[in-house]
Image (cartoon, grey):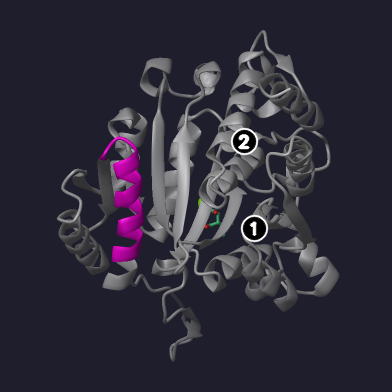
Amino acid sequence: MSAPAKSILILAGDGIGPEVMAQVKRVIDWMQKKGLAQFALEEGLVGGASYEAHGTPLTDATMARAMAVDAVLLGAVGGPKWDDLPFEKKPERGLLRLRKDMELFANLRPALVFDPLVEASTLKPEIVQGLDIMIVRELTGGVYFGQPRGIETLANGERKGVDTQVYTTGEILRIGRVAFELARKRGKKLCSVEKANVMLSGVLWREEMTKLGKDYPDVQLSHMYADNCAMQLVRTPKQFDVIVTDNLFGDLLSDCAAMLTGSLGMLPSASLGAADAQGKRKALYEPVHGSAPDIAGKDLANPLATILSFSMMLRYSFDLGAAADLVDQAAKNVLAGGFRTADIMQPGKAKVSTSVMGELLIRELDKLKG
Ligand code: IPM
Ligand code: MG
């Protein structure tokens, strides 16, 4: 009996989203043809694309589909066209609603330096060669969602903007466990990042992580202030294995870590919810890069981050580690073959378009599994 098809909701979104997603679909087709897995694909709109069609960055119907499928694959949201929309209509709200309503509290952002790209980093090769960090960002709490928030007018006519940083022990512990478990499977080092020197939510964060650490005696736990972490990331990034941090610091530090690798266009991410009784987690996968409106529609974007996000889906949602390894290896082989999209172009290499990069990847997959 063959396994039931795995259902995926594809939300290509805005800007370069649709063109990079087109390359992922080729990989999905390839896997089905090879009999490696069967997928039931659905497509929907998110962000500006959804706003144009429905007047909202995410419809309730699409939200319901996202809740129902095994995993969601998202391209990118946003663009200057929608910058002046009211806050609740902005493309980003669609993504934030997906994260919040699916309760995707654990955001995994690997920063991995591919050997052929070591020269693409703005840092010296010896600082980044072999770099392999995992940032675990809390994604449904903190200042992104804390109450009260708002803009109000004071009696004296001044206006006041308020956001609230807030974390409960439950929120800290559940993200902590994800991070400790991951560290256990990797280099067994976990660095917990906050600003306990200034923020009380940071004091609580540090206390709870320290307590939790007692359950993971095999993992070496350290603590670092977020500003120092930003500095250490560009000074000696290889000191880190897994970093766990809150929503806002994780947003900043993951961009910083991404750049160490030489290209945002290479980095995937996974956002996971809590495991249910069967061990299944709600999950959304997306590249770390944005919608890059300046190059949208020009066949210039790097599709690898979204393809590698699909590979993370194979690994974390579908337990198809061997298939994920194939995709990762094919990406490495294309790079080793000297092919580069514009964002990672280097002297002496062959510059290729989005679609040619996709084509080359399929060719490598064929070589790996003809
Ligand atoms: C990210 C992005 C988002 C965030 C935006 C698009 C809302 O920067 O995924 O890192 O701030 O979380
Ligand atoms: Mg960000």
- Pick the quarter of the image with the C terminus: top right
Out of 327 and 141, give the one closest to the viewer: 327
Residue tagged by mark 1? 72
Q: Residue furthest bottom?
A: 155
Q: Quadrant of residue 40?
A: bottom right
Can residue 176 be seen by looking at this rendering?
yes
Q: Quadrant of residue 54?
A: bottom right
Residue 122 in the image: x percent, y percent? 48, 24
Question: In the rendered picture of this protein, how many numbered marks are placed on residues?
Answer: 2
In the displayed structure, does residue 120 sit left or right of residue 41? left
Residue 210 in the image: x percent, y percent? 16, 57
Q: From the image, state whether disc 2 or disc 1 is nearer to you.
A: 1
Residue 121 in the image: x percent, y percent? 50, 24
Residue 204 in the image: x percent, y percent? 21, 67
Residue neighbourhood size for the residue with mark 2, other residues' Cα within 10 Å, grouped as few (<14), some (14–19), many (≥20): many
Residue sitting at 50 percent across and 62 percent down? 281
Above or below residue 97? Residue 178 is above
Residue sitting at 83 percent across and 67 percent down? 52
Above or below residue 253? Residue 55 is below
Residue 175 magenta-highlighted: yes
Q: CA distance from mark 2 to mark 1?
A: 19 Å
In the displayed structure, does residue 124 sit left or right of residue 14? left
Ligand 1 lies in quarter: bottom right
Residue tagged by mark 2? 265
Q: Report the predominant secondary structure element of the magenta stretch.
A: helix
Q: Which residues are magenta?
A: 173-188
Residue type at tag 2: Gly
